[in-house]
Every structure is written in structure tokens, then in C-alpha cells.
Image: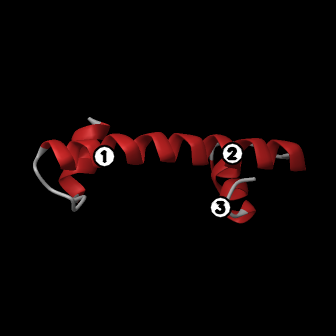
Amino acid sequence: MSEIPVAPVVRILKEAGAERITDDAKKAFADAVEASAEELAKKVIKAAAHAGRKTVTVDDIKFVCE
């Protein structure tokens, strides 16, 4: 089960153009967002470690997202 609340999921989908969203779709989208965020977090942590740091910085996030 996703730890991401439903309200932000609904907002993101609606801002992207969805008019209606089933409860199953909300859950599936939240699960997908969480999985993507976890993968991004792993890459960001790896970038910080490569730079010799334990602390993640905004530069690590920008680097990984480029």
C-alpha cells in the first residue's frame, strides 16, 4: 500500500487533464509515483555518496534529474 495520500494524486491527475478517476486508478497511480520516487531517491543518494557525502543536496537532485 502506498504511503502517498490520495489528495495529491487526484490533484496531479486532474492538473494533467483527467476529468474522472476511479479509486483503483488513484491507488495504482499513487503506487507508481511512490515506486518512481524510491528509484529517484536511490540515484540521488548514490550521487551524494559518489561526491563523498552522506548528506543529499539540491545539487544531487538536479544532477540526477538532468
**Of the two numbered discs 2 and 3 in the rendering, the one whose residue sits closer to the viewer:** 2
Estimate the x, y position of residue 10 in percent, counting from the top left: 73, 55
Q: Residue furthest left?
A: 52
Residue bearing mark 3: 8
Residue bearing mark 2: 31
- Amino acid type of disc 1? Val
Drawn side of residue 1 relative to residue 48, left or right: right
First-in-chain label (2 vs 1) = 2
Circles 2 and 3, Cβ within 8 Å, touching? The answer is: no
First-in-chain label (2 vs 3) = 3
What mark, if any, has residue 17 been given in the picture? none
Q: Is residue 14 visible?
A: yes
Drawn side of residue 48 relative to residue 26, left or right: left
Q: Residue at x 14, y 56 (%)?
A: 53
Disc 3 on helix, strand or loop? helix
Residue bearing mark 1: 44
| Crowdedness near tag 3: few (<14), some (14–19) or many (≥20) residues, C-alpha within 10 Å | few
Circles 2 and 1, Cβ within 8 Å, touching? The answer is: no
Estimate the x, y position of residue 5 in percent, counting from the top left: 69, 64
Q: How many marks?
A: 3
Q: Residue at x 70, y 50 (%)?
A: 14
